[in-house]
Every structure is written in C-alpha cells, then in structure tokens.
Amino acid sequence: MNISLLLYGIGALIALLTIVITTLNIVTYKMLFMPNFARYTVKQDPLGQDWDVMVPYKNLIEKGENWWFQQPVEEVWMNSYDGLKLRADLLRSEIAAKGTIILVAGWHGYPLRDFAPVYRQFHEEGYNLLMIDQRAQWKSEGQFMTFGIKERYDVRDWITFVNGKFGNELPVFLYGISMGCATVMMTVGFELPANVRGVIADCGFTSPYDILSYQIKATYHLPEWLLLNIADHFAKKEAGFGFKEYSALTAMETNVTPMLFVNGDKDDFVPPFMLEKVYNACKAEKERLVVKGAPHSISNCVDNEGYLATALAFLRRFST
C-alpha cells in the first residue's frame, strides 16, 4: 500500500469533515440567532406557520387579536444598553391601574398570537399591558437573537421605562413564553426595583446551551459537540454572547421575586424537566401550574379557563 497515498486520503477526509462540520455550525448559528423573515412586512397567520396543533384554538386566538386591534394601543420605543432601538405596544388600563404587565414572546414569536388568549382578561382586570418586540424580532432593531442572554438587559430596561411612565410604586409583573420565559427568568437575576412583584414563567429553558444540546440530540440524533462548539465560537465573535454565559438557574441563586412556573406536560420542544430544575432552584415564593395535554407554548389555549384563573390569582395576590 502506498503510505503517501493513504496519508493523503486521510488528510482529505479530515479536511472534508472539517468543512462539513464548520458549515453545519454556521448554518445552525444563522438559523437559530438571525431573523429569517422580513420582520415587519410579513402578515402573520393567526395560527403561525401552518402549525396543526393550533387549529382547535383558532377562534380563541382570533377573538383575542380582534379585540386588541380595537384598543387604543400606543407604539413606544426605547434605546437598549447597546444602542438598539426597541419597540413595544402599550395599552393603558381604562380604570385605575393595578399594575403593568410586560409581555415577552419567544423565539420568532408573534406576540399578538402568543398572548391573545389572555391579554383581554388581564387588561379588564385593571393592568396596563406592555407587549414588547424582542431584539432582532419584528420592528425592534438587532441582527441577533441571544436566547435571553442580552434580552434580559432589555427587559430590565423596559422595567425602567415603565417606571418612568407610571412611577415606581405601581406593581410591575413580567410574563414570558418560551424564549420569552427564559428571558424573564434570567432578568430576575438582576437587583430589580421593589415594585417588580412577580413573574409568570411559561415553558422556558434553563440556558441557550441546554436547549440547543437537547434539541440536537432529540431531533437530529447527533452529538452536541458536532454543532455547538463552533456555533458557540461564532456566537461569541459575531453576536457577543456565549451559550453558557448565563442561565435561569444562575438567576435563581439571587432571585427574590415571586414566580409562577407554567408548562404543558406534552411539551416536546422545551422538555418540562428544564422548568422543573428552575422551579427547584428558586428560593423565592413560587407556584407551579402543569397543564395536562398541552404541547409547547400553548398552555394558555389548551386550558384557557384554568390558566387564567391561576394567573389572575397570582397577579391579585402580589399586586397588594
């Protein structure tokens, strides 16, 4: 056997594998962290991207959205800590406000849809609603989503924005779904103003690394190192964050804000054990709601009545 030819073949194979792995990492990075549509020109279907699981709840969602479109919603903006213009919709309470709820949707989320089953009831209960566009989503600026790492600073600053509007005595609540949940869970790692009274944390993950690792194994049956190591390098170089930089578990070490943790027991996108870990790590006052039969991010649809009853009871308890 020609040793030189063998070595050449091995070298070529290693080079090819390196190119393939690097390409997979770049594609993974771009798919996960960069916007994949013209954010403010695409008209969203109420059900999302032909998601069959949403079909039974189409009327519930459309009813909520139609109500929202009839309200005197204000478009508001603020500058992020790193110079991005971030946008939100503000709907003021029509009665003496009991507080303000900051609504935070998830990865490529559609806030109007995600919160449609509940925002009317929250508003009629007497809460101002601030529904934000996370960075790099919809009309907010930004090239990269960071799975809560930088978004937690944005939510912290939206709290400051709200207090500038309504004063620092009026209660503030955070409410996040999916990546929005991870964001608000990470936000409580800051020393927040005393009027931040509670968090509704619906189906969030523990950290960017944990959810990416889980999905790579569960969906693609690949080892995590194959796609995460170089992708993490690109994230640090291009977007300025690392997959292991921070986590909801770390935030719980210092959190003093009461938490309502919610997940569906049929969630196969963000596994329920992740939220259970955060729940167990939380040292503040806490409650938990597990919605039977609910897949990822639609617990507020599957058991709308029970979800609202639990959420409203939580808001009332900590508003006074």
Image (tube, grey):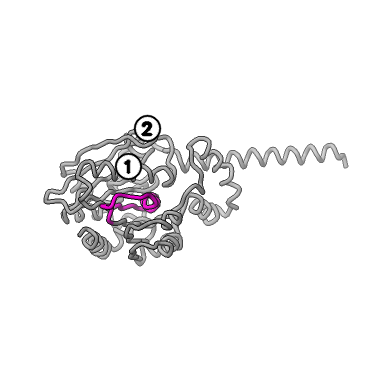
Quadrant in which residue 287 is drawn: bottom left
Q: Which amino acid type is marked by label 1?
A: Asp
Q: Label 2's element?
A: loop
Residue 302 in picture, x, y percent from top left: 31, 61
Q: What residue range appears in magenta?
A: 174-197
Nearer the observer, 44 or 286: 286
Residue 217 in picture, x, y percent from top left: 55, 55
How many numbered callouts? Answer: 2
Q: Residue 230: in sight, yes or no?
A: yes
Question: Is residue 47 shown left or right of residue 239?
Answer: left
Question: Is residue 36 shown left or right of residue 243?
Answer: left
Image vertical order of residue 81 relative to residue 117, above or below: above
Task: Provide the residue designation for mark 2.
Answer: 83
Quadrant in which residue 76 is drawn: top left
Residue 226 in picture, x, y percent from top left: 60, 47
Q: Label 1's element?
A: helix
Q: Residue 63: in sight, yes or no?
A: no
Nearer the observer, 88 or 80: 80
Query: What residue appears at the point 73 percent right and 37 percent down from the top-left corner?
Result: 12
Task: Provide the residue designation for mark 1.
Answer: 157
Q: Is 191 within the magenta? A: yes
Image vertical order of residue 169 relative to residue 26, above or below: below
Q: Which amino acid type is marked by label 2?
A: Gly
Query: What residue appears at the point 38 percent right and 49 percent down from the top-left corner?
Result: 190
Question: Is residue 239 shown left or right of residue 113?
Answer: right
Crowd tier of the residue under label 2, counting other residues whose Cα lies within 10 Å: few below 14, some 14–19, many 20 or above: few
Which of the image's four quarters has the C terminus?
Answer: bottom left
Disc number for residue 91: none
Query: What residue appears at the point 21 percent right and 50 percent down from the top-left corner?
Result: 169
Quadrant in which residue 144 is drawn: top left
